[in-house]
Structure formats: structure tokens, C-alpha cells
Amino acid sequence: MANHLKFYIYDLELTVVNSNSQLRRLLIATANRSILVVEDIDCSIKLKNRTSDDEESENPRHKKVTLSGLLYFIDGLWSSCGDERIIVFTTNYKEKLDAALLRPGRMDMHIHMSYCTPSAFKVLALNYLNIKEHELFGEIEEGIKKTEVSPADVAEQLMRNGTVDYILQSLIEFLRLKSEQDKAKQEKQELEKEEEDSEVEKECCILEYLSMLFL
């Protein structure tokens, strides 16, 4: 996004911001035409507790950004000063976020980042390796179809040092190992479920036997 729009990009770590006023000062210091990224917003602040600034001032040793402060930051004067700004939030637990944070005007677009697809891989290969085609693409795309792997995992593999051939071969090996791990995990879960069902069945048989004894 930043490359396409030619925007500056900032990684905003809310957990190290000491107060709502400091958050405001940080925003003022950012450049116009910028993207602010807040990763794992569900872990950054007390999302279900809209602590007021008054409460914050009463506890100076525990100052942190509050949900109320964040909401003001998003849709108040500070989010529209200067030129264009884009705020990107990421989360693995959207259901944990306060409804006030999710509403239009604050989070205008909700984009679900699915597992990597063959088309997404080609975009990543172009971005990181500057290639559109390669003889190994077919094997990689087949591996991606069979494996639940995130675009971030694929990008991490593409950022390795080495020749294009080496990087793509490493990605193929990564996908193979990931597929084996996923298969082993699924088999373990199925085995645990079978054992659990077996225990439940045994308990039912015991209860049935005991009930017959008392008849």
C-alpha cells in the first residue's frame, strides 16, 4: 500500500504509548500522506473498558492509551489534521473488539486475510523476487492449494538470502513440511476425539449397568 500510494509508513505500538495525550502528540509528529499500522489491536488496550482521561490522571503510574482516547484519535480532529492518513489495524480476534471501534467511519473496510492462494503467491513472488513466471511455480501452487499457509509465512520464505532457484526450492520444502505437520496434527486430534468418545461410551455403559443393578 505504502509503495503504491507513495505514502510514509509508521508502526504504532500502543502498548508503549503512556497516555492519550502522548498518542495525540505522536500523530501530530507524523508526516502528511502516511499510513499508521497498529498490529494486534485486540492486545494493545483494554478494549472493553472505556476508561476516561480523568481515571487515567488519577493513576499516573498506570497510564496507558484508553479505548476512549483511541476513538477520539481515530475520528476526532487529530485523525484529520494535515493531509491524508490511513490507519490500518490488524487482529486475529475481531470478536473481541468493541463495536464502537468497528463501526463505519472508524474502520471503513474490514478485510479478511485468508490463507495464501496461488494468485496471491504470484503477487508475492513479483514483489519480493521480481519474477512473473518460473518453472517451479506449478509445483509451488499445487503445494499452496493443499496446505493452509498464510501469505506472511510465504513472504518470509521469499525473503531468504540466495538465488531465485534456491528460494523457490526452499519454499517447496517448507510447504511439504507444513503439510506433513498439519496432517499429523489432524490425525492427533482425530485420535484424541476417538479416545474421548470411547471414554464417554464406557461411562454410559457403567451408568447403564449400575441402573440395572438398582432396578
Image (tube, helix red, strand yellow):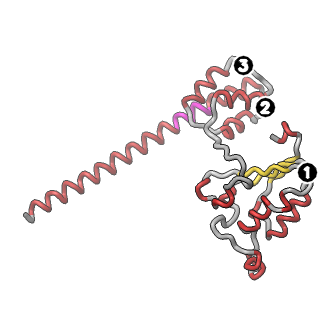
Q: Quadrant of the N terminus?
A: top right
Q: Secondary structure at mark 2?
A: helix
Q: Residue at x 84, y 36 (%)?
A: 4
Q: Earlier in the sequence, mark 3 or mark 2?
A: 2
Q: Residue at x 13, y 62 (%)?
A: 211
Quadrant location of the C terminus in the rendered image: bottom left
The x and y percentages for residue 129 are 78, 28
Q: Indicate the amino acid at tag 1.
A: Asp
Residue in the picture at 76% in, 74% down: 63
Circle 3 is placed at which residue position?
Answer: 134
Which residue is label 2 attached to?
127
| Relative horizontal placement of residue 32, taking residue 117 as reference (left or right) | right
For the residues carrying marks 2 and 1, which lies nearer the camera in this image? Answer: 1
- Residue occupying the far top of the picture: 135
To which residue does mark 1 refer? Answer: 83
- The stretch in magenta equals 174-181
Q: Amino acid at mark 3?
A: His
